[in-house]
Image (tube, rainbow, N blue to C red):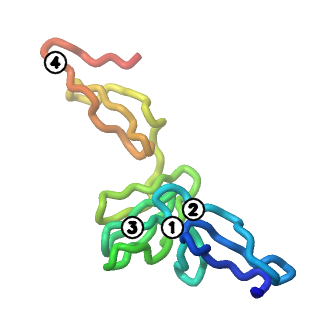
């Protein structure tokens, strides 16, 4: 027996269960993804990264999360909106504007290098420095 609408993690810690309206049994409603586990975060049952960098903010699924001192997720801080991506460096994380199309290339201004848009679309990074008499030309 269970309270209708109640949610919990199953015994494996990999799935979310929901109590049926008749209160007779739980049924699986969602499975956690690779590298995730089921838990209660901020009073809500859900899937979250199984581990994280202790006492740091980090990115998971386009959201900014906080991590407790024991290396387990404390909870979601924010969800990045349309035109934003979560960017983290292992110590902090934040939503940043998407400014380019991932994989698109361009010539850098002034230093003769080819730049490529990062996978998250939040900026460009040098992919190749032009050598000797080479000149970068935007196609």
What residue is rendered at 45% in x and 36% in y?
102
Residue depth check, mark 1 versus mark 4: number of the one nearer the observer: 1
What residue is rendered at 48% in x and 53% in y?
85
Q: Earlier in the sequence, mark 1 or mark 4?
A: 1
Contact between marks 2 and 1 (CB within 8 A): the answer is yes
Q: Which mark is residue 32?
A: 2
Check disc 4 and report the residue beneath it. Answer: 131
What is the spatial separation of the Cα atoms under label 3 and label 2, in whole angstroms?
14 Å
Check disc 3 and report the residue beneath it. Answer: 51
Contact between marks 4 and 2 (CB within 8 A): the answer is no
Q: Neighbour class for label 1 at 10 Å: few (<14), some, many (≥20)?
A: many
Name the foreground residue: 79 vs 16: 16
What residue is rendered at 77% in x and 87% in y?
1
Which quarter of the figure has residue 3? bottom right
On the image, the x and y values in percent for residue 125 come to 30, 38
Q: Earlier in the sequence, mark 4 or mark 3?
A: 3
On the image, the x and y values in percent for residue 56 come to 33, 70
Q: Secondary structure at mark 2?
A: loop
On the image, the x and y values in percent for residue 21 come to 84, 79
Q: Neighbour class for label 3 at 10 Å: few (<14), some, many (≥20)?
A: some
Q: Secondary structure at mark 3?
A: loop
Q: Which mark is residue 37?
A: 1
Name the foreground residue: 56 vs 41: 41
């Amino acid at each position: 027996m269970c309270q209708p609408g109640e949610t919990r993690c199953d015994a494996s810690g990999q799935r979310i269960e929901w109590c049926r309206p008749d209160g007779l049994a739980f049924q699986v409603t969602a499975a956690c993804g690779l590298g995730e586990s089921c838990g209660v975060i901020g009073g809500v049952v859900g899937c979250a990264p199984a581990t994280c960098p202790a006492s740091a903010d980090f990115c998971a699924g386009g959201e900014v999360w906080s991590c407790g001192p024991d290396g387990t997720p404390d909870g979601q801080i924010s969800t990045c909106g349309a035109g934003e991506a979560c960017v983290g460096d292992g110590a902090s994380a934040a939503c940043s504007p998407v400014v380019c199309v991932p994989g698109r290339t361009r010539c850098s201004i002034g230093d003769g290098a080819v730049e490529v848009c990062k996978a998250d679309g939040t900026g460009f990074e040098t992919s190749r420095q032009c050598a000797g008499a080479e000149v970068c030309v935007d196609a």
